[in-house]
Amino acid sequence: MRSGTVVKVADNSGPCFLRIIKILRSHPQATAKFGDHVVGSVLYTHQQMKFKVEKGSLVRAICIRIANSHLRSDGQRLRFQYPAVAIITKNGVPRGTKIFGPLPKELREQGYIRLMSLGTIAL
């Protein structure tokens, strides 16, 4: 994922889609990988749910799925159909209480145990 990419929000914090503004890494043209923090703008929210996150607000998120293929150390290639993020606070605590869809086990290796516990499937 690069800056300007529209990604799906995979938790129940309110927004549906997010446009990535900046990837919080050292290199400006870096692509986001599993576990990278990004800053994005909310494009669309659920109409039926009333949450604190509104359309147009800037939020921090963490990449939980990427569409590019990822090579694991054992030789497997991992690739998802679409990129997805989960909304977090500035301290790194997830805002939602549930994450929909699969999560890669690389997040557990990076120390995101709280995210893994909110997920349903681990690959």
Image: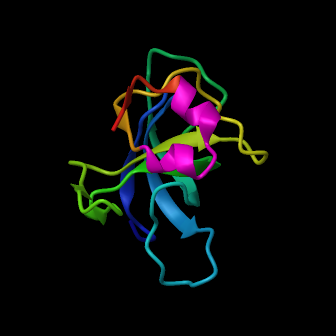
Q: Residue at x 54, y 43 (%)?
A: 108
The one of 85 and 3 positioned closer to us in this rendering: 85
The one of 88 and 118 positioned closer to us in this rendering: 118
Quarter occupied by residue 22: bottom right
Residue 3 in the image, given as x and y percentages of width and height: 45, 70
Tally the numbered discs: 0
The one of 54 and 39 positioned closer to us in this rendering: 39
Q: Main secondary structure of the magenta part?
A: helix
Q: Is residue 2 above or below residue 11?
A: below
Residue 77 in the image, given as x and y percentages of width and height: 23, 59
Tell me if 34 is positioned left or right of 50 in this view: left
Residue 106 part of the magenta-drawn span: yes
Q: Residue at x 58, y 40 (%)?
A: 87
* The C terminus lies in quadrant: top left
Q: Which residues are magenta?
A: 105-117
The one of 3 and 24 positioned closer to us in this rendering: 24
Q: Residue at x 51, y 22 (%)?
A: 98
